[in-house]
Amino acid sequence: MEQKDTGAAASPGQAKPAEAKVTARGPAKTAARDTTAQEATAQAIRDAARDFSKEMAESIRKS
């Protein structure tokens, strides 16, 4: 991938403004959004499993 030199020096540990602009959209943004959705889905599954487990434990105690 060819990058344009904007003439601005990047401080250590920071990307040049042109590089930051590239990662803020396109595939990187889509990947970040997908990761967030996957994390939310995983949390919803964990919550549902926890609730189900509590319901089953209560049902067994009542038996």
Image (cartoon, grey):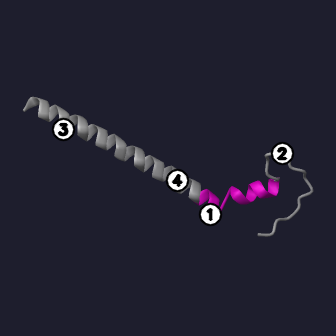
Which disc, if any, is residue 56? 3
Tell which circle, 1 or 3, labels the residue nearer the N-terminal end: 1
Tell which circle, 4 or 1, labels the residue nearer the N-terminal end: 1
- Residue at the location (37% across, 45% down)? 44
Residue 53 sits above or below residue 3 on the image: above
Q: CA distance from mark 1 to mark 3?
A: 43 Å
Q: CA distance from mark 1 to mark 2?
A: 25 Å
Is 30 or 42 nearer to us in this picture? 42
Q: Amino acid at mark 2?
A: Pro
Q: Secondary structure at mark 4?
A: helix
Tell which circle, 1 or 2, labels the residue nearer the N-terminal end: 2
Label 4 sits on residue: 35
- Range of magenta residues: 17-30
The chief SS type of the magenta part is helix
Is 39 or 29 nearer to us in this picture? 39
Q: Residues within 10 Å of mark 2 (few under 14, many from 20)?
A: few
- Residue at the location (7% across, 32% down)? 63
Q: Is residue 3 left or right of residue 55?
A: right
Which disc, if any, is residue 40? none
Q: CA distance from mark 2 to mark 4?
A: 28 Å
Q: Residues within 10 Å of mark 1 (few under 14, many from 20)?
A: few
* Residue 46 percent coordinates (x, y): 36, 43
Q: Amino acid at mark 1?
A: Pro
Label 2 sits on residue: 12
